[in-house]
Amino acid sequence: MDISRKLGSLVFCGVPAIVGGGIIYAAFGGSFTVVLIYEALLLLAAGAFLSK
């Protein structure tokens, strides 16, 4: 995988982390613990996607 494709994947995975993190934070009453769990799951999914 070339560098431009990796950077594109990084942007593709970064947007849900930022936007989704805010939505999760607001939906669960301002709990950072839930946001950290969400971010960890996203990190695992992105790692699995990029390892292919």
Image: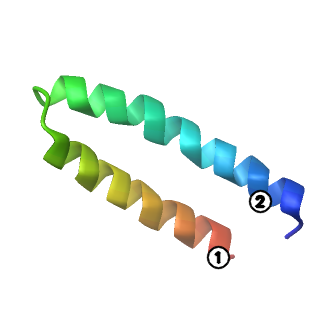
Q: Amino acid at mark 2?
A: Lys
Instruction: Specify the quadrant that holds the N terminus.
Output: bottom right
Task: Work out how far the residue at label 2 is from the one at label 1, CA to CA, in angstroms.
Answer: 11 Å
Q: Seen in the image, is 44 located left or right of residue 11?
A: left
Q: Position of residue 43 (x, y in %)?
A: 45, 61
- In the depicted view, which residue is nearer to us: 45 or 6? 6
Residue shown at 65% from the left, 76% from the top: 51
Does the CB distance between marks 2 and 1 fall below 8 Å? Answer: no
Q: Seen in the image, is 25 located left or right of residue 51?
A: left
Residue shown at 49% from the left, 38% from the top: 16
Where is mark 1, residue-wise?
51
Instruction: Specify the quadrant that holds the C terminus.
Output: bottom right
Q: Position of residue 27 (x, y in %)?
A: 19, 25
Q: Position of residue 20 (x, y in %)?
A: 39, 34
Q: Is residue 14 above or below residue 43?
A: above
Q: Seen in the image, is 3 located left or right of residue 27?
A: right
Residue shown at 36% from the left, 51% from the top: 39
